[in-house]
Image (cartoon, grey):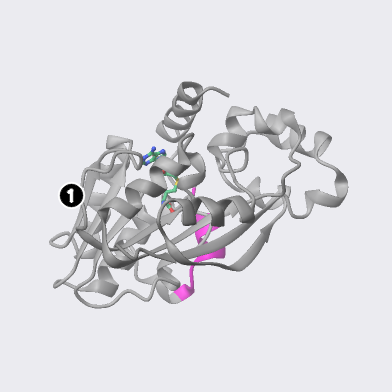
């Protein structure tokens, strides 16, 4: 698919999702403690594939950027971890997602140090060397320009800053019908990289100590829970993906890396 087609399908898919769509996936990804304490709207809009805040070792005073903050679930968890001496900036390409993050931050009582900025991960609205940690959950895969998005993450991190993102990785042999499906792109599968390529792109973007870990397998039935996949694309995947691979069509990994400056 061409970059513009991908951008359009991603924006239009996320722009027309029904509210409450993310609740069932959130129950799988987050602990009861994390969920119990979150505003309903942040949980309803949870659309990620992992739980990056659980792995990011955030500390009081950190400035965190959440690429593709969506309804704000990870931004709020990060804001609680960094406290009022820190700062969280969620960035999302959709103004309505930014608004949801702001409202959820308000409801969670963290709005003073948790903001949302309208922008693209490929062109972050932040100065160089300005943040301590970049987090992201199911977003880098949506970019048709992943190297550019990772280079932007490196640009805004201060020397010694860290990246901790969760995203799907896939095997190299997804059928072409899946790779060219707009719904599979919006669902983070068609745009996913292999582990090897993800690690290489991080290294090429200037990151060191790249580590990929905590692998969670997702079957076709698991990904069907996301509102991003309609019945048609689920049927397509069941038809064209070899049966032996249907139980692990994608794997969520936590990718960690450091920015040496
Ligand atoms: C799979 S959802 C994940 C949302 C959130 N991280 C979560 O875990 O619930 C992807 C989000 O990335 C946003 N997004 C897609 N492309 C983007 C881009 N190029 N720059 C910034 N945000 C983007 C979408 O609008 C959507 O809110």
97 sits to left or right of 257: left
Across and down, in percent, residue 12 comes to 44, 27
Residue 235 sits inside the magenta stretch = no
Across and down, in percent, residue 9 comes to 49, 27
Residue 59, relative to residue 141: is it above or below?
below
Name the residue tied to disc 1. Answer: 127
30 sits to left or right of 197: left
Which quarter of the figure has residue 135? Answer: bottom left
57 sits to left or right of 100: right
* Magenta part of the chain: 22-32
User: In this rendering, does residue 141 appear at all?
Assistant: yes
Query: How many numbered callouts?
Result: 1
- The prevailing secondary structure element of the residues shown in magenta is helix
Depth check: give the residue in front, 245 or 39. 245
Across and down, in percent, residue 36 comes to 40, 71
Depth check: give the residue in front, 213 or 74. 213
Q: Secondary structure at mark 1?
A: loop
Depth check: give the residue in front, 91 or 30. 91
Identify the residue at horizontal 40%, vertical 32% (top origin). Answer: 15
Residue 203, relative to residue 122: is it above or below?
below
Which quarter of the figure has residue 253? Answer: bottom right
Identify the residue at horizontal 73%, vertical 30% (top origin). Answer: 176
Across and down, in percent, residue 223 comes to 64, 48
Identify the residue at horizontal 42%, vertical 51% (top origin). Answer: 205
Task: Tell me the quadrant of ligand 1.
Answer: top left
44 sits to left or right of 250: left
């Amino acid at each position: 698919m061409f970059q513009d087609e991908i951008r359009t399908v991603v924006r239009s898919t996320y722009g027309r999702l029904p509210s409450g769509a993310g609740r069932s996936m959130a129950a799988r990804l987050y602990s009861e403690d994390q969920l119990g304490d979150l505003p309903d709207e942040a949980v309803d809009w949870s659309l990620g594939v992992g739980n990056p805040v659980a792995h990011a070792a955030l500390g009081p005073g950190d400035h965190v950027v959440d690429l593709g903050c969506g309804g704000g679930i990870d931004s709020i968890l990060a804001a609680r971890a960094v406290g009022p001496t820190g700062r969280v900036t969620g960035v999302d390409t959709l103004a309505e997602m930014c608004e949801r993050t702001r409202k959820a931050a308000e409801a969670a009582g963290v709005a003073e140090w948790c903001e949302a900025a309208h922008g693209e991960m490929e062109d972050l609205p932040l100065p160089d060397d300005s943040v301590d940690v970049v987090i992201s959950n199911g977003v880098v895969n949506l970019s048709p320009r992943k190297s550019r998005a990772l280079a932007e993450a490196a640009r805004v991190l201060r020397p010694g800053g860290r990246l901790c993102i969760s995203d799907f990785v896939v095997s190299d042999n997804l059928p072409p019908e899946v790779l060219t499906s707009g719904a599979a792109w919006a669902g983070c599968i068609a745009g996913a990289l292999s582990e090897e390529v993800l690690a290489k792109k991080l290294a090429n973007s200037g990151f060191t100590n790249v580590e990929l870990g905590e692998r969670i397998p997702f079957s076709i039935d698991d990904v069907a829970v996301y509102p991003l996949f309609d019945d048609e694309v689920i049927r397509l995947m069941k038809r064209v993906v070899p049966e032996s691979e249907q139980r692990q069509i994608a794997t969520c990994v936590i990718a960690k890396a450091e920015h040496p400056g």
